[in-house]
Amino acid sequence: MSTQILLVDDDLDLTDMLGEYLENEGFSVTQAGSAEQAMELFDAGRQFDLCVFDIMMPGLSGLELLQQVRPKVSTPVIMLTGKGDDIDRILGLEMGADDYLSKPANPRELLARIRAVLRRSVPVKEETNKQALSVGAVNLTPARRVACVDEIELQLTAAEFNVLALLMERAGQVASKEWLTEQVLHRKLTAYDRSIDVHVSRVRQKLEQAKPGLAEMIKTVRGEGYQMVVGVEG
C-alpha cells in the first residue's frame, strides 16, 4: 500500500503541482483547500502517514489546525512557512510539528523532507535490535518507539523521540547541535536554525510534566550542545 500524504493549502495550483509530483514518486496524495476541509477528513476517521500544512490560510491557520489535531493523532507534520517567518517556524515546532519548509516549496526539497521525516518515524531494522535504555526514571524501548517516566508514557513526536534516544545513548557525554541536527533532521545545521533547540525544549517540557524536576536531566552546554545528566531523579 502506498504512503498516504495529506496536503493542506489554499493555493490550489501549488497543491496540484506538489500532488502530481509526489504521486509520480509513488505516494498517494489527498488535497484539502483549507484547514476546515482537513478537519472534516480527520473527523471522518481518515488516516495519513504524513501531513503537510500551510501556515497562512484563510479561516483556521495551519498552526491552529496543528493545535487541534496534534492531541488526537501522532501523524508526522511538515509546516509550510513564509520565507523568513522564524516565529511561525518555532511556534509550529513547539506545537508538535516535525519539520518545516519555506515557501515557495520546491517539490524536490519537499520530497526529501518527507522521506527524512518518514525514515525517523518508523523503526528501522537496526533500531529494533537495540536494547532498551534506562537513565534514572526514564526508560526507552527503541523497538516499540516508546519512552516512559516510571509508568507514564511520554507522548513524543518522532523527532522528540529520536532526540531523547540519542541523548540517552550518550548519557554523560555532550552531543553537539550539529550532530543532533544531522542525526535527527537529516540535514546540516545552518545559521539561525533553532529546530533542534525547540525539539530538545519540547522533550524537557514533557519530562517535567511527567515528573517535576526531571527537565534538569538535559543540560545545555553553552557553545557545544546538550548532555543527558546521570543521577537526576526529579
Image: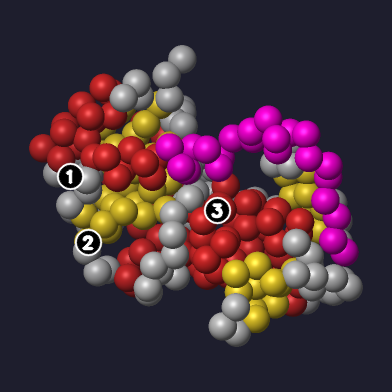
Look at the numbered disc 3 and give the secondary structure of its residue: helix
Residue at the spot x=75%, y=61% of the render? 170
Residue 215 is drawn in which quadrant? bottom right
Q: Which residue is mark 3?
A: 184
* C-alpha distance separating marks 1 and 2: 14 Å
Residue 91, by quadrant, is bottom left
Dot 2 corresponds to which residue? 82
Q: Please tell me in which quadrant of the rendered image residue 90 appears.
A: bottom left
Residue 123 magenta-drawn?
yes
Badge 3, how many Cα within 10 Å: few under 14, some, many 20+? many
Say left or right for 208 vs 233: left
Residue drawn where x is 17% and y is 44% of the image: 10
Q: In the shown orientation, is residue 132 left or right of residue 189?
A: right
Q: Is residue 17 above or below residue 55?
A: above
Q: Position of residue 29 (x, y in %)?
A: 31, 26
The amino acid on which the numbered mark 1 sits, given as a three-letter code, is Asp
- The vertical placement of 106 against 3, above or below, is below
Position in image of residue 193 (x %, y %): 40, 69
Look at 46% across and 32% down and name the residue there. 49
> Label 2 crowding class (10 Å Cα cut-off): few <14, some 14-19, many 20+?
some
Residue 92 visible from this viewpoint: yes
Name the residue carrying label 1: 10
